[in-house]
């Protein structure tokens, strides 16, 4: 059985005091769940203080992006080594907002994933088609291209430990969730492709999150699909109640 992983992507939201308060509430209300990985992703500036606030708890921290180089003259960037040193265990890579607004390429995502692993971070590799691509019938072609590029620099064993986030761009921040069946179709295709590129055993181990307007009222049906192993949550992760309800809904646990 794959261990569920629920991550909250806080994007460019929250002051430091708001981030610390939210982290503390997530820790207090989700810390008892040992059967899942719960992750929060504050802005880079807040990774260290949030990680310090969560130290000793089961809640992990992710950065939202990294540079591929270990260090160097790259003004404004954060290296994977620095992110690891600041207390994060994960880094989100290739989020569609980064692809759309900051020129991230498939090849760049591959390099960043490689660098993340080299510095002890688990990459959460984001892939997903736009509405135009879906409507043109190119959904699986696009997702496969992005996936192949992200996995190409990795060994099969490394692939087993990455997290893949399938996030259809048309569902992000729009309130328009993929139906569980739509998500499952792509998740199954992703797992098949991982099997082709590595082995069926590795594909069985890799965790695939769904992202795009995940809310307390749709998480349970998404998680009921066989190839959906968790969620990458944007808007609904900014408020403790809804994020905790998503975590408990994903696990079939009681909310508190
Ligand atoms: P959303 O964002 O939940 O607000 O749609 C998801 C994401 O961008 O990871």
Image (tube, helix red, strand yellow):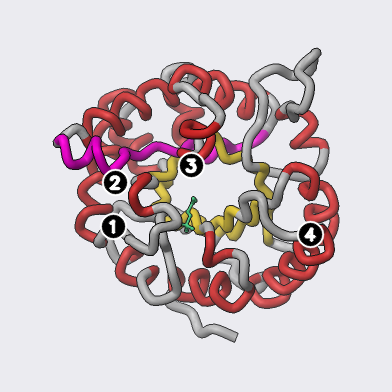
Q: Nearer the viewer, mark 1 or mark 3?
A: 1
Q: Which residue is outermost to the top?
A: 73
Quick one: label 4 or label 2, which is nearer the N terminus? 4
Count residues near mark 1 (Cα–Cα under 10 Å), then give few for <14, some for 14-19, many for 20+: many
Q: Are marks 2 and 3 in contact (CB under 8 Å)?
A: no
**Circle 3 SS class:** strand
- Residue at 78% x, 70% y is 21
**Circle 4 SS class:** loop
Q: Quadrant of residue 159?
A: top left
Q: Nearer the viewer, mark 4 or mark 3?
A: 4
Position above or below: 250 against 72: below
Q: Which residues are magenta?
A: 121-136
Quick one: label 1 or label 3, which is nearer the N terminus? 3
Please state if 152 lies on the left or on the right of 225 as rendered. right
- The residue that disc 1 covers is 178
Q: Marks 1 and 3, Cα distance to the nearest angstrom?
A: 19 Å
Q: Marks 1 and 4, Cα distance to the nearest angstrom?
A: 31 Å
Quick one: label 1 or label 2, which is nearer the N terminus? 1
Q: Marks 2 and 3, Cα distance to the nearest angstrom?
A: 12 Å
**Circle 2 SS class:** helix
Q: Marks 1 and 2, Cα distance to the nearest angstrom?
A: 12 Å
Q: Quadrant of residue 14?
A: bottom right
- The residue that disc 2 covers is 187
Quick one: label 4 or label 3, which is nearer the N terminus? 4
């Amino acid at each position: 059985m794959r261990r569920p992983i629920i991550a909250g992507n806080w994007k460019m939201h929250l002051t430091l005091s708001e981030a610390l308060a939210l982290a503390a509430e997530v820790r207090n209300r989700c810390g008892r769940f040992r059967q899942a990985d719960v992750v929060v992703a504050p802005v880079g500036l807040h990774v260290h203080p949030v990680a310090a606030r969560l130290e000793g708890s089961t809640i992990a921290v992710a950065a939202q992006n990294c540079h591929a180089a270990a260090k160097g003259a790259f003004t404004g960037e954060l290296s994977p080594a620095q992110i690891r040193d600041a207390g994060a265990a994960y880094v989100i890579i290739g989020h569609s907002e980064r692809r759309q607004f900051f020129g991230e390429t498939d090849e760049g995502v591959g390099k960043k994933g490689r660098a993340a692993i080299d510095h002890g971070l688990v990459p959460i590799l984001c892939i997903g088609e736009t509405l135009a691509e879906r409507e043109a019938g190119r959904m699986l072609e696009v997702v496969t291209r992005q996936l192949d590029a992200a996995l190409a620099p990795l060994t099969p064993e490394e692939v087993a430990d990455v997290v893949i986030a399938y996030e259809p761009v048309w569902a992000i921040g729009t309130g328009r969730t993929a139906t569980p069946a739509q998500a499952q179709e792509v998740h199954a295709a992703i797992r098949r492709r991982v099997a082709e590129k590595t082995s069926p055993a590795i594909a069985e181990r890799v965790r695939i999150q769904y992202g795009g307007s995940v809310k307390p009222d749709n998480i349970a049906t998404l998680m009921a699909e066989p190839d959906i192993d968790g969620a990458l949550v944007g808007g609904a992760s900014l408020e403790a109640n809804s994020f905790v309800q998503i975590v408990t809904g994903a696990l079939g646990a009681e909310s508190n």
